[in-house]
């Protein structure tokens, strides 16, 4: 596995390339005798660096909950990093409050000159949910108010910025109300919450979204667990009891997006992968990474995978080669076929790499 911290879990992650170094940010919490699902309230945002996505140096914790009362005194959860026009870096992240039992999610930001030291921006979140568009907290429908996992990117039109996030719509079966929400901004500070980028009624959550372009298609990744699917959709058998990462697709970054296949390209019945991300190596090769979620016995792993090949088929479907993690190869595609897609030269390790120590 490419990255793990002895004695701690590692899961959702995001990243930024700066010169020759990839900066990886991730959620981490200490391993205890408690069930791994209880790690979430203890999450902190950690930092690691690498030049090859295989050998990593752990740089320590960069963000943690504020002292109460504060909008993020309950948790600091998943986000993304962008470089501002003034050269500073901006990390968007999810926060909750202790006084609200961590049920209400909001989105705020921190700023850095060097990607190592971060200062939280102001004393308020930058975005709060719009109750006219998205579902707010209702214990009869869902366990929390979903408004998290901000993925921020420059508007491909060349004007301003866009954000996608995990959210839920107010109507429909609770198990199928998950949507990918969106917001727009001219300057990364003033944001307008917009109607969903995508809704379909199949998933209770569409977590950890990411949008990118590959081979002339715009893809939006999301992750979901089989326990969070609409019962009517699950009963069709189209997707199976699968957990992992999947995608929607469009010819335009603004949509409309569509679900072109039911079977998850980065999922299986075990749930080995979750929170998958697309990124490019220093040489520009496309790769896929995910956090290692479940073992075959159902126990939680809590580490981040090696980079593995990702490509598009002639039909424009996403595929990965996750056989080193026990994932079946879709479409019986051989490694030679993957190389024809421009993936030759991606050197994957045959051993667990050394992880250098770092400060906290």
Image: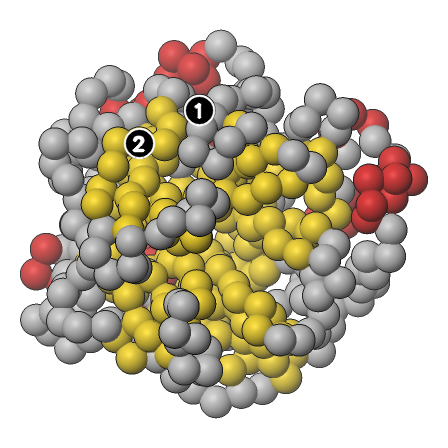
Between the C-alphas of marks 2 and 1, the distance is 11 Å
Residue 159, above or below 87: above
Residue 242, picture quadrant? top right
Looking at the image, residue 112 sits to the left or right of residue 350; the answer is left
Q: Nearer the viewer, mark 2 or mark 1?
A: 1
The spot of residue 206 in percent (x, y) is 40, 36
Q: Nearer the viewer, residue 255 or 242?
A: 255
The spot of residue 205 in percent (x, y) is 36, 35
Q: Nearer the viewer, residue 302 or 283?
A: 283
Q: Nearer the viewer, residue 183 or 178?
A: 183
Residue that numbered label 1 is attached to: 256
Residue that numbered label 2 is attached to: 196
Looking at the image, residue 32 sits to the left or right of residue 239; the answer is left
**Residue pictured at 33% horizontal, 61% vertical:** 92
- Rate crowding at label 1 as few (under 14), some (14 to 19) or many (20 or more) other CA atoms within 10 Å: few
Q: Secondary structure at mark 2?
A: strand
**Residue pictured at 65% horizontal, 40% vertical:** 214
């Amino acid at each position: 596995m490419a990255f793990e911290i002895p004695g701690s879990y590692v899961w959702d992650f995001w990243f930024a390339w700066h010169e020759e170094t990839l900066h990886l940010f991730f959620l981490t919490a200490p391993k205890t005798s408690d069930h791994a699902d209880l790690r979430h309230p203890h999450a902190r945002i950690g930092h690691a660096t690498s030049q090859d996505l295989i050998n990593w140096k752990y740089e320590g914790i960069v963000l943690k909950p504020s002292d109460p009362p504060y909008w993020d005194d309950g948790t600091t959860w998943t986000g993304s990093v962008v470089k501002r026009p003034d050269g500073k870096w901006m990390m968007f992240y999810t926060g909750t409050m202790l006084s609200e039992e961590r049920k209400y999610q909001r989105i705020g930001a921190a700023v850095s000159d060097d990607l190592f030291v971060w200062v939280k921006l102001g004393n308020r979140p930058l975005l709060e949910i719009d109750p006219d568009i998205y579902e707010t907290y209702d214990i009869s429908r869902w366990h929390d108010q979903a408004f998290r996992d901000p993925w921020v990117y420059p508007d491909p039109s060349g004007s301003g910025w866009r954000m996608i996030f995990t959210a839920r719509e107010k109507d429909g079966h609770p198990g199928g109300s998950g949507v990918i929400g969106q917001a727009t901004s001219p300057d990364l500070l003033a944001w307008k919450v917009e109607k969903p980028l995508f809704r379909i009624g199949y998933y209770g959550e569409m977590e950890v979204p990411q949008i990118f372009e590959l081979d002339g298609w715009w893809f939006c990744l999301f992750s979901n667990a089989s326990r969070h699917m609409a019962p009517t959709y699950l009963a069709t058998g189209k997707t199976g009891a699968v957990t992992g990462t999947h995608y929607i697709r469009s010819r335009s970054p603004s949509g409309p997006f569509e679900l072109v296949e039911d079977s998850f390209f980065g999922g299986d019945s075990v749930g080995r992968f979750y929170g998958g991300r697309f990124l490019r190596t220093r040489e520009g090769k496309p790769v896929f990474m995910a956090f290692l979620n479940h073992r075959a016995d159902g126990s939680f792993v809590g580490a981040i995978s090696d980079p593995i090949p990702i490509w598009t088929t002639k039909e424009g479907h996403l595929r990965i080669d996750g056989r080193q993690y026990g994932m079946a190869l879709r479409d019986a595609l051989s490694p030679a076929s993957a190389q024809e897609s421009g993936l030759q030269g991606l050197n994957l390790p045959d051993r667990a790499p050394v992880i250098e120590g770092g400060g906290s």
